[in-house]
Image: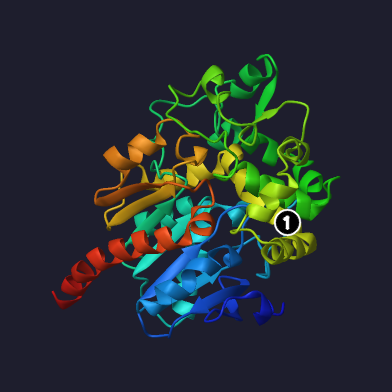
Amino acid sequence: MQDPIDATHLPQGVRARMLRNVNGLDMHVLEAGEAGRPLLLLLHGFPELAYSWRRVMRPLAEAGYHVVAPDQRGYGRTTGWTAAFDGEIQSFGPLNYVRDATALVAALGYDEAACVIGHDFGSPVAGNCALSRPDVFRSVVLMSAPYGGPRPWPKGEQARPEAVAGLASGGMNEALARLDPPRKHYQWYYSTRDANENMWHAKQGLANFIRAYYHHKSADWAANKPYRLAGWEASELAKMPTYYIMPQDLGMAETVAAEMPDAAAIAANNWLPEAALAVYAEEYGRTGFQGGLQAYRCTTSGLVAAEMRLFAGKRIEVPSCYIAGASDWGVYQKPGDFEAMQNTACADLRGVHLVPGAGHWVQQEQPEVTVDLLLDFLRGTAAKQKSERSD
């Protein structure tokens, strides 16, 4: 079994341990607060770790919660998964991530989590948890990635099996390639055999790759000024920065290298200090990125859409909230999802917050504001949960 992360890397009040046999995983978790208090489950995104929540965990615990952040399947010190490109990817499908989260709640000794909170890739995981097991996940906070809900069943007889059809791009990559200059969509790039090696063994070095990637998507990169796109069209998607719509002939390592912050910007950054960057570089240096990339392959292959169609027509009924950075293109990168989340996917959406001074990494860039928004939402849901238990 992997050892937990060294305590010297963690803020005071945050501890680490391993939990064995959690849906087939030995799961590495960070914790703050006392067991037996209402449980908050924090699910990270890509390329992040449980460590990405370190700046919000203690304040949430001090408000009376037991706060737990796992390294999700495919990441960090959690083991029991395999990331061979030619191996199976079904275990990285959306419902197995729900099983991981549900099994973790039980492994911690709980019947339910007061709230599941997900950022980036963790946002659809959290949304799927709340959609499929509202009895276990009593409320949900979606961060950065809006939750548009399961895709509807296609009407009529289909020409191809969905697993073959995949997440239909409608010729999107071909259309992007015809632009001047030619472009490609990052999720399809992340699904290629070359993506892991390109980032893991980046020519500029792994730490410099991670720094540039984080900088490029943050509010520190002044050109991050997102807005709604007209639709799923190449000419519209190409308005997004290159970390989403990439130069056709470059990998992600080369793409973000062009936006590497200078020495002054690095010195001014108070949310990604050298010690934190070293943790990310150490963890990804050991594992590579393929474990996280497997979930993108599930998306582009059609597995995600096929599995989640089991819940087509259902909404998230538990109380929900959305938080993102005001400088986060993740809000709009999939045209229509932000509106669908507000209009159809969430029955009890209690807040939509775009945080000034934050880009994609809102809980790292603006932890104090994030904590305040989370606690405001949690206080509003606590009375409802208490009432439902007494009925």
Q: Please, which residue is most extreme toward the right here?
A: 203
Question: How far from the left and from the top, in percent, is residue 247?
Answer: 71, 27
Q: Which residue is mark 1?
A: 83
- Residue 102 in percent (x, y) is at 45, 68
User: Is residue 218 toward the left or the right of residue 137 in the image?
Assistant: right
In the depicted structure, whether residue 68 falls above or below residue 87: below
Kindly tell me whether residue 356 is visible in this rendering: yes
Q: From this viewpoint, is residue 127 visible? A: no
Q: Quadrant of residue 40?
A: bottom left
Residue at 68%, 14% (x, y): give it. Answer: 180
Q: Is residue 152 above or below residue 377?
A: above
Q: Quadrant of the C terminus?
A: bottom left
Q: Give the amino acid type for the residue marked by disc 1 in the picture.
A: Ala
| Label 1: few (<14), some (14–19) or many (≥20) C-alpha neighbours in 10 Å | some
Establish if 14 lies above or below 217. Answer: below
Q: Is 332 or 318 nearer to us in this picture?
A: 332
Q: Residue at x 66, y 75 (%)?
A: 9
Instruction: Look at the image and tell me in which quarter the N terminus lies.
Output: bottom right
Direction from residue 77 to residue 136 in the image, left or right: left
Q: Residue at x 73, y 42 (%)?
A: 260
Q: Position of residue 217 (x, y in %)?
A: 59, 43
* Secondary structure beneath label 1: loop
Asked whether 169 or 180 is in front, the reply is: 180
Report which quarter residue 82 is drawn in. Answer: bottom right
* Along the viewing direction, whichever of 210 and 302 lies nearer the viewer: 210
